Image: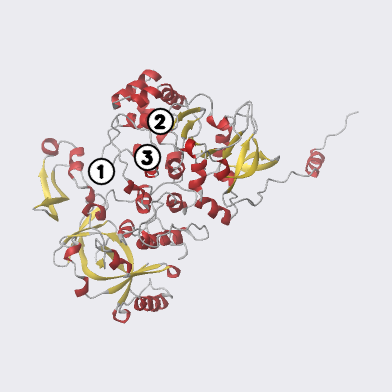
């Protein structure tokens, strides 16, 4: 006798059993340096389910002794994964890319299900040992991401967490035949690479160890450095403060020093077209490499050093907060606020009296964090400089539909996006601001999203030329802007270059190379009186050229008037601004207040020497920037 099978009855039976609840975090109850660690259980196969435990400890208890922490990391990584070596103390910190996918891949924590991102799942699969437990710190697992207070605390101490780790595992993702071949060659030729005295010797070592041709190695090096990992903002801090970074792609590991020497040597073979623009992938790696060396040198930690010329710099000046923000601008972050928070812990503390670290709080929006950063740099960067404003301007990426609270104002740099300009005017002219003047001639009104600066209107833009970067490879007259430094005076001139590209300039490369990098993306404007100026590409006829008291360069601002742009809070804003200026011993009642969008820095012929300006003789206005 056959019984009829009913699917609906089976489904009801399955769902009748109680489900195992998902893993939930318990609050940390330890000392101020308390952290969680993931204890990865061993697995015989890479495809085995991921099982782990989470324990509470502290980075102080887990860190190595000072004598060990100052040792030089091994350049040639053995085939035994360092993270899997048995140890009752110490942990490996994971550096990887979160990816854009939401947590959807299940693992087991303390016997309970928990979803993680596919990228983290791949990393854990490759980091497990087949026989022993692996002690690991991974931010998305060891920090309760639903707790804002816990995120604030751990991000503030991220530097200590990675510094205390036994090693930092830089996981680049799944391996490919090409990446495996290159990393195996780097590992096998490690001692020869660090002993090489020329770049060509490094490349020969790699060719001999891999059996690949030079151009094939260069191609694989580019592919590795164009992986999403290198675009992340958090990797900067994770690598720089690590005592022993180890690069892992798939199942192959190599030491950081030998990895950098090998890839930088290979990518020096690449010739990049374009005036002022280099190999971005190589530049990113070089920046982190030299920043890490500067970090360690300043703290008295020993650095391994290449015996061949890597053409880099170890200047400590690259570690200021503004330097780091500018060099990492346009990197990727899951949270836009991390564009600031990820590098603030690395920045050299300002030397000005009363200086303090930039506060980290996820309670504020990205706009609030970016505005606070401008104010912090105006007050605490040691120079009291308006230089931060040279990196701001009208943001084409800001959504006009976003609320005023979340919209980044024009005067705050939007660190999420690369700068449209390769070279800043304020950097090229090397003119510094006057700190005391800057500090006493601006106020910050965060609840109005406004910065109010005292200055005066210098001139008005009457006409604007075509974009100077629009170079057309055609014979005849080419209108372009060049910079001359004749008789020790820097002037802008606009003229036509009559040439035959086939005979005089030869190639488009030659033409682009003859253009000054300041002209890329900028326009030439004629001001009242026939004065020439180099202005941002967003500038319009009628925009105002303004001088802020104490600034090293003039700026272009756009008058918002009293029409469609006027907001209900402008009256209260003006009253508060005048009151604050009066408290600062400014003659607030004599100031005229205007409302403006900040367009960007500019170069004005005859106005670039701060010594020639006499602000006291000029009528001053308050520029309320929105």
Q: Are marks 1 and 2 in contact (CB under 8 Å)?
A: no
Question: Could you say whether the residue bearing mark 3 is in a helix, strand or loop?
Answer: helix
Mark 3 vs mark 2, CA separation in Å: 15 Å
**Residue 102 in view here:** no
Mark 1 vs mark 2, CA separation in Å: 27 Å
Instruction: Return the residue nearer the eye: 314 or 122.
Output: 314
Mark 1 or mark 2: whose residue is earlier in sequence? 2
The answer to which image quadrant residue 535 occupies is: bottom left
Q: Position of residue 179 (x, y in %)?
A: 44, 27
The answer to which image quadrant residue 202 occupies is: top left
Say if 77 sits above or below 365 in the image.
above
Which residue is tagged 3?
293
Which residue is tagged 2?
259
Q: Residue at x 50, y 61 (%)?
A: 364
Q: Residue at x 36, y 26 (%)?
A: 194
The crowding category of the residue bearing disc 3, from other C-alpha atoms within 10 Å (few below 14, some 14 to 19, many at least 20), is many
Instruction: Return the residue nearer the eye: 201 or 270.
Output: 201
Q: Position of residue 310 (x, y in %)?
A: 30, 33
Q: Position of residue 167 (x, y in %)?
A: 50, 36
Apparent side of residue 338 relative to residue 217 in the rendered image (left or right) = right
Quadrant in the picture for the C terminus: bottom left
Q: Which mark is residue 276?
A: 1
Apparent side of residue 597 relative to residue 88 in the rendered image (left or right) = left
Quadrant in the picture for the N terminus: top right
Q: Residue at x 14, y 55 (%)?
A: 490
Instruction: Return the residue nearer the eye: 467 or 488.
Output: 488
Say if 283 sits above or below 175 in the image.
below
Between disc 1 and disc 3, the foreground one is 3
Mark 1 or mark 3: whose residue is earlier in sequence? 1
The answer to which image quadrant residue 599 occupies is: bottom left
């Amino acid at each position: 006798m056959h019984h009829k099978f009913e699917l609906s009855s089976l489904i009801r039976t399955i769902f009748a059993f109680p489900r195992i609840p998902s893993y939930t975090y318990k609050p940390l109850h330890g000392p101020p340096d308390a952290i969680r660690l993931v204890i990865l259980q061993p697995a015989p196969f890479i495809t085995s389910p991921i099982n782990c435990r989470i324990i509470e400890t502290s980075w102080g208890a887990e860190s190595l002794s000072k004598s060990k922490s100052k040792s030089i990391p091994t350049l040639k990584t053995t085939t035994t994964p360092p993270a899997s070596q048995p140890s009752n103390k110490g942990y490996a910190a994971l550096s990887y890319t979160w990816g854009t996918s939401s947590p959807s891949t299940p693992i087991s924590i303390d016997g309970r299900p928990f979803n993680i991102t596919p990228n983290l799942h791949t990393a854990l699969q490759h980091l497990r040992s087949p026989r022993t437990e692996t002690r690991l710190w991974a931010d998305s697992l060891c920090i309760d991401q639903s707790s804002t207070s816990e995120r604030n605390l751990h991000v503030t101490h991220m530097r200590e967490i990675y510094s205390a780790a036994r090693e930092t595992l830089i996981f680049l993702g799944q391996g490919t035949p090409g990446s495996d071949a290159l990393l195996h060659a780097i590992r096998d030729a490690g001692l020869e690479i660090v002993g090489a005295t020329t770049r060509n010797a490094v490349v020969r070592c790699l060719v001999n160890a891999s059996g690949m041709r030079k151009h094939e190695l260069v191609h694989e090096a580019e592919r590795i450095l164009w992986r999403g990992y290198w675009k992340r903002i958090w990797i900067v801090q994770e690598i720089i403060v690590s005592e022993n970074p180890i690069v892992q792609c798939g199942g192959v590991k190599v030491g950081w020093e030998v990895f950098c020497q090998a890839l930088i040597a290979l990518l020096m073979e690449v010739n990049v077209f374009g005036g002022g623009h280099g190999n971005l992938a190589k530049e990113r790696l070089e920046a982190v490499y030299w920043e890490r060396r500067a970090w360690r040198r300043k703290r008295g930690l020993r650095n391994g050093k290449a015996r061949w010329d890597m053409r880099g710099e170890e200047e400590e000046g690259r570690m200021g907060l503004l330097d780091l923000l500018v060099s990492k601008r346009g990197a990727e972050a899951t949270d836009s606020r991390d564009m600031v928070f990820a590098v603030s812990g690395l920045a050299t503390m300002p030397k000005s009296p009363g200086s303090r670290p930039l506060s980290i709080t996820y309670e504020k929006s990205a706009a609030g964090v970016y505005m606070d950063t401008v104010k912090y740099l105006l007050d605490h960067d040691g120079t009291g400089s308006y230089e931060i404003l040279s990196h701001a301007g009208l943001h084409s990426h800001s959504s006009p539909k976003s609320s005023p609270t979340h919209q980044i104002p024009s005067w705050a740099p939007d660190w999420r996006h690369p700068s449209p300009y390769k070279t800043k005017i304020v950097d090229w002219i090397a003119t510094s601001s006057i700190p005391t003047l800057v500090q006493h001639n601006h106020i910050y009104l965060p609840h109005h999203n406004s910065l109010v600066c005292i200055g005066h209107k210098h001139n008005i833009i009457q006409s604007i030329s075509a974009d100077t970067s629009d170079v057309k490879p055609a014979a005849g007259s080419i209108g372009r802007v060049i910079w001359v430094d004749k008789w020790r005076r820097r002037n802008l001139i606009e003229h036509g270059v009559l040439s035959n590209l086939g005979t005089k300039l030869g190639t488009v490369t030659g033409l682009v190379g003859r253009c000054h990098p300041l002209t890329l993306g900028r326009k030439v404007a004629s001001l009242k009186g026939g004065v020439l100026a180099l202005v941002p590409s967003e500038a319009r006829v009628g925009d105002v050229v303004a001088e802020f008291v104490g600034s090293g360069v003039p700026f272009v601002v756009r008058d918002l008037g009293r029409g469609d742009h006027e907001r209900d809070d402008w009256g209260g804003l003006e009253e508060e601004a005048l009151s604050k200026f009066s408290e600062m011993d400014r003659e607030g009642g004599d100031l005229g207040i205007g409302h403006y969008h900040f367009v960007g820095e500019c170069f004005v012929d005859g106005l670039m020497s701060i010594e020639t300006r006499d602000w006291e003789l000029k009528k001053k206005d308050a520029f309320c920037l929105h």
